[in-house]
Image (cartoon, rainbow, N blue to C red):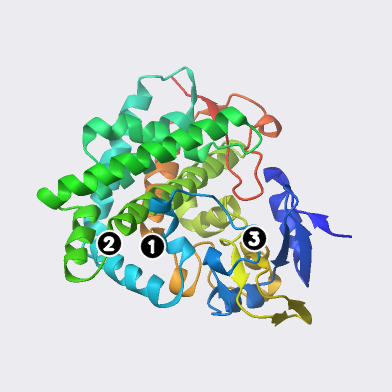
Amino acid sequence: MVRTIGTTAQRRWEEHASWRGAVQLAELPGGQQVWVISGYNEVTALLADERLSLDKRHSGGGYAGFALPPALDRNLLNMDGDEHGRIRRLAVPAFSRRSTESLELVVRRIADETFAALAESAGETVDLLDRLCVPVPALVIGDLLGVPADLHPGLRDAATAMVTFDAASKESGRRLGSAIGWLTTTFTALIDAKRAEAGDDLLSGWIRAADDETLTGDELVSLAFLMMLAGLENAVHLCGNLIAALLGSGGITATDWAARRRDLMERANPLPFAIRRFAVTDLTVGGHTIPRGDTVLLSVFGADSDPARAGRPSLMFGRGPHYCLGARTADLIVDAVVPEFFARHPRARLAVPPAESAYRNSWRAHGLVALPVVLDA
């Protein structure tokens, strides 16, 4: 019997542990068939295997992910080989020019400003997703990209629409479509403005790189959109899941955070699978043949919780040529938000029982829809 991949966040680790030990044919909630591979050794090898492609053009008609406008579709999460290598090679230096120290200063400044605004609601019940977990990553990424301050409200609204998307809600789908349209228009206009007057930001750095090699307008817009989509979703839900879990267990001190950080981060990981891949040839894994064109999902949860991992690195940010460009930024955001929240609000408590916390109805990303918390006075 073909199993259906679940959408319940609270059971995600147990479910993915149950996939381990074999290659299994499964079904998404929408009915599309996919192959699930779980197990640290298998997932580690396949994350860097050229026989699995991220390019939708290799799909045989199964699940292929979001349908995006052309200006956004040719991004690094839909490319392989020389095409992917060319754009990543041009994109990386703009990240590298920012030292960890200068990037940390940006993150700390934005986090401090957000915490100062949050302090005005002391003694009240607030949605920490809306007041803390969304704005800090959204404004950090906006700052890195060079988004002007007057566009920050729109950036926050678009970010909220993306990270709270519920596939079962038509209204949520409409908000997501509007957010994608706003981001496409905004980034296109920003790129035109920065061609005329460059700054010290990622968009300007990418434009300078494009002067030396061919980097199209669509590729520039797609890079900016990818920063928002991938960077936001991971950082927002990591912060939300971590704070929710820690509030449910009595909080955490700075010393305990330093000691438990790795395990807590992995447990709060909102993305159970690596991005979908397609077999470019008939592929044999664990005695099973995966036909060319079929969709493959690599279970990061299953791999990271596999006893065979034996202390080896987590796969939550990927491995190989598709290792997450924004991993360092996500780490800095989490460190600026989570332990600092408990330092500033040591007696904060969840406004609802943990079992009643509202999570997105999604198999692809397990994050909260809201995080109602009573702040200490």
Task: Check disc 2 and report the residue beneath it.
Answer: 95
Q: Which mark is residue 325?
A: 1
Instruction: Check the image and name the residue furthest to the right.
Output: 1
Give percent across and percent down for residue 368: 58, 37
Q: Is residue 12 toward the left or the right of residue 76 in the image?
A: right
Relative height, residue 156 to residue 321 (above, below):
above
Query: Which label sits on residue 301?
Result: 3
Q: Position of residue 282 (x, y in %)?
A: 69, 80
Quarter of the rendering occupied by the N terminus: bottom right
Q: Are marks 2 and 1 in contact (CB under 8 Å)?
A: yes
**Residues tagged 3 and 1 counted as in contact (Cβ below 8 A):** no
Question: Looking at numbered disc 3 in the image, what kind of residue is underneath it?
Answer: Phe
Viewer-side residue, 183 vs 242? 183
Task: Say whether disc 2 or disc 1 marks the residue closer to the N-terminus.
Answer: 2
Q: Residue furthest left?
A: 197
Q: Is residue 49 left or right of residue 138?
A: right
**Residue nearest the viewer, comparing 26 with 100:** 26
Q: Are marks 3 and 2 in contact (CB under 8 Å)?
A: no
In this view of the protein, can residue 106 be seen by the observer? Answer: yes
Q: Residue at x 64, y 80 (%)?
A: 281
Say what secondary structure mark 3 lies in: helix
Mark 3, other Cα within 10 Å: few <14 / some 14–19 / many ≥20: many
Q: Nearer the viewer, residue 179 or 216?
A: 216
